[in-house]
Amino acid sequence: MYPVADVDDTAGFMAAARAWKPERDYFTSSAQAGDVSSDKQGNEDDSANATDYNVTAGDDDFVGIPGDDAFDGFAPPKSDVGDFEAGPETQKSVTDWDGADNTVKQQEKQRVTAAQTPSEEEDCENLTTFKSWGAPAPRDKPAARIRRIIIKGLPTAWCSPAKVLSLVHGGAIDSINVTSSGTARILFCEADACKAFYDKYPNGINLDREKKLGVFVEMGQEVDVVSSSLSFNLSVGATRVVRAVGAQMDVNMEQLINLASSKNGKLEKIIDTYIPGEARSIVFRFCSVDDAVRFRAAFVREIEFEQCNVQYAADPCEAATGYHVD
């Protein structure tokens, strides 16, 4: 029989209520243990199971059976969370309150910092959205250098691409432009060839020693970037010279000139060679690599020249080591 408190004693009853703490296993082990104990005792005197309550008037302490806690079986189950205790972060948040929770501010700051940090694992090429552009790929190309030579003081008779290019040597030519005022601008394909040509003529080039006729050689002031198209053309072996072998004999020079200039290409010269018993060879020299590439792309589609073998030829300025007429 469970102990019963005297409800008439208000102070004692309230003390018992405040001290009431049922344990977790009250409804299982405690109940079963009580049933087993009752079976063993049988018809023993009920006074043996009686519980004495000694309550002092005016005292809130509750006293049960000596040595036992009368309400140990009524202790409430302990929470897994545990008792609430204000931690340092909570106390700091309450102490430093300035209209907004500092803890929330710190969390927002951490999220912003994480969002600004670039992710190295993102595959930006295959993602629809991504947090950052990522680190740029390293450049494997060398820095741009000067590739331009300027020849000034050309006589009127020398103001033609063919005449000027006979003076240039040591490297392949990307493009050439000659003005009527006697200034020629030659762009080499490689910066080293440009520098070597400039160093070879520090005092200019003598065109006629008897007449003391010469021209000045200068180097460009700004770097010349190698474009992606030029880089690709050079990688496939393109030059400003196109050679067609096996052309028909009924094609005259006028037709060849019209064909070469049909794509707005600027032509340096055409060299037509025929040896009896051999195939006819026609060499087209343009003033730029781009003009030669466009011409070859159109030439191989001409029905009249479909039997020709059309290839790029070596630039004569690259093979020459000095003044050359060819």
Image (tube, rainbow, N blue to C red):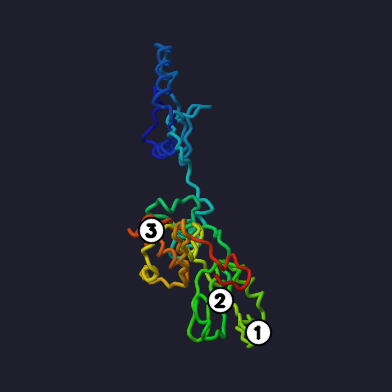
Disc 2, disc 1: CB below 8 Å? no
Disc 3, disc 2: CB below 8 Å? no
Of labels 2 and 1, the one closer to you: 1
| Residue 24 image position (x, y, % from top left) | 43, 30
* Image quadrant occupied by the N terminus: top left
The amino acid type, in three-letter code, at marker 1 is Arg
Residue in the image at 43% along x and 16% along y:
37
Of labels 3 and 1, the one closer to you: 1
223 displayed left or right of 49: right
Of the two numbered discs 3 and 1 on the same chain, state the one appearing first in sequence: 1
Name the residue beneath numbered marker 2. 222
Q: Above or below — where is 155 with respect to 79?
A: below
221 displayed left or right of 296: right
Of the two numbered discs 3 and 2 on the same chain, state the one appearing first in sequence: 2
The amino acid type, in three-letter code, at marker 2 is Glu
Q: How many marks?
A: 3
The amino acid type, in three-letter code, at marker 3 is Val
The span from disc 3 to disc 2 (Cα, nearest Å) is 37 Å
Extreme-left residue of the structure: 303
Name the residue beneath numbered marker 1. 209
Of the two numbered discs 2 and 1 on the same chain, state the one appearing first in sequence: 1
Q: Above or below — where is 187 with respect to 5?
A: below
| Residue 183 image position (x, y, % from top left) | 53, 83
Determine which of the numbered discs, if any, sits on residue 54 in the image.
Answer: none
Residue in the image at 54% along x and 60% along y:
139
